[in-house]
Image (spheres, rainbow, N blue to C red):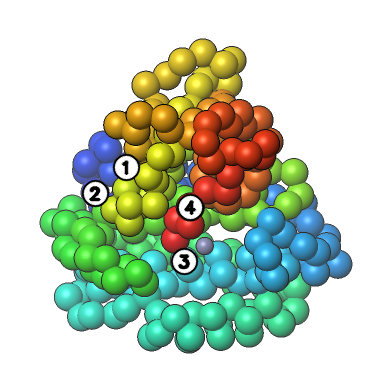
Amino acid sequence: MAARHDQTTDPGLQENLLQARRGTAFFARKLNELTDAQLDGDTLLPDWTRRHVIAHVGYNARAIARLIEWAATGIETPMYPSPEARNHEINFGATLSPIALRNLFDHSAVHLSVEWRDLPDANWTNEVRTAQGRTVPATETVWMRTREVWIHAVDLNNGATFNDIPTPILEQLLKDITGAWKTRRTDTGLLIKATTTAGTDTNLTFGDTTATNPTIITGPLPAVVEWATGRGTTGITATGPRTKGTTPSAPPWI
Ligand code: ZN
């Protein structure tokens, strides 16, 4: 994963690449803490064992590498042939032997890192298409990978938490997620306020900011992001009409 000498000279992009590689290293660390037998264990995702998560993270690197090849050559290579092919690949990957599964993760991560490293400055603005059909510049692939590796490291369910995720990444996640809700208008009457871990105010307020009597979801930033990604309500305080004694579930994000 030790990529040396990225071709890009853009300091912001270099910093983002560092965050993606740090996240990949963090996922690798959590994966390496698991014994082969533990790969069969449950994750935070319904119906997915750790094997599914590891296979998905490996194939995700390959899929993002295809987008970088597209940005490099101009020859259209989608992330996945179809959503069915993506799901089939994950289910197949989950049946691999532990060593093959670990190699899939390692090799795909190195491959993606090299593709990023070798992409010239001029090609980073070339447009590619995500699995959801969004057209984005190649620079966006760095964020796509960053959020995958950090969140799925928590999903592995062997000790990583949202507190392990760097604050700038948590802030970007919350912006992304609440932005998706706004686009779909699923945030009506829902106000989300993240505090610092010490409980003091921040300017991180999202959702339906003009509602007269909103349901307010608040808590430290890691807890709010955990809630927003649908992975728990620990540390969350909810008040207002939607609560009925419990914290309401976050609207779907992906
Ligand atoms: Zn994913």
Residue position for label 3: 61
Q: Which residue is mark 4?
A: 251
Q: Provide the secondary structure element on which disc 2 rests.
A: loop
Label 3–label 1 contact, CB within 8 A: no
Res. 5 visible in picture: no
Of labels 4 and 2, earlier in sequence is 2
Disc 2, disc 1: CB below 8 Å?
A: yes
Categorize mark 3 by other alpha carbons within 10 Å: few (<14), some (14-19), many (20+).
many
Q: Are marks 3 and 2 in contact (CB under 8 Å)?
A: no
| Mark 3 / mark 4, whichever is N-terminal | 3
Disc number for residue 14: 1
The answer to whether the residues at label 3 and label 4 have Cβ atoms under 8 Å apart is no
* Mark 4 residue CB less than 8 A from any atom of ligand 1: no
Q: Please state which amino acid type lies under the numbered disc 3.
A: Ala
Residue lying at 56% horizontally and 85% vertically, measured from the top left: 88
Using the image as rendered, state which of residue 41 and residue 69 is in the foreground. Answer: 41
* Separation of marks 2 and 1 at Cα, in angstroms: 7 Å
Query: What kind of element bears circle 3?
Result: helix
Q: CA distance from mark 3 to mark 2?
A: 20 Å
Q: Position of residue 248 (x, y in %)?
A: 58, 44
Which callout, 3 or 4, points to the residue nearer the camera? 4
Of callouts 3 and 2, the N-terminal one: 2
Give the Cα separation between the discs numbered 3 and 4: 27 Å
- What is the three-letter code of the residue carrying label 1? Gln
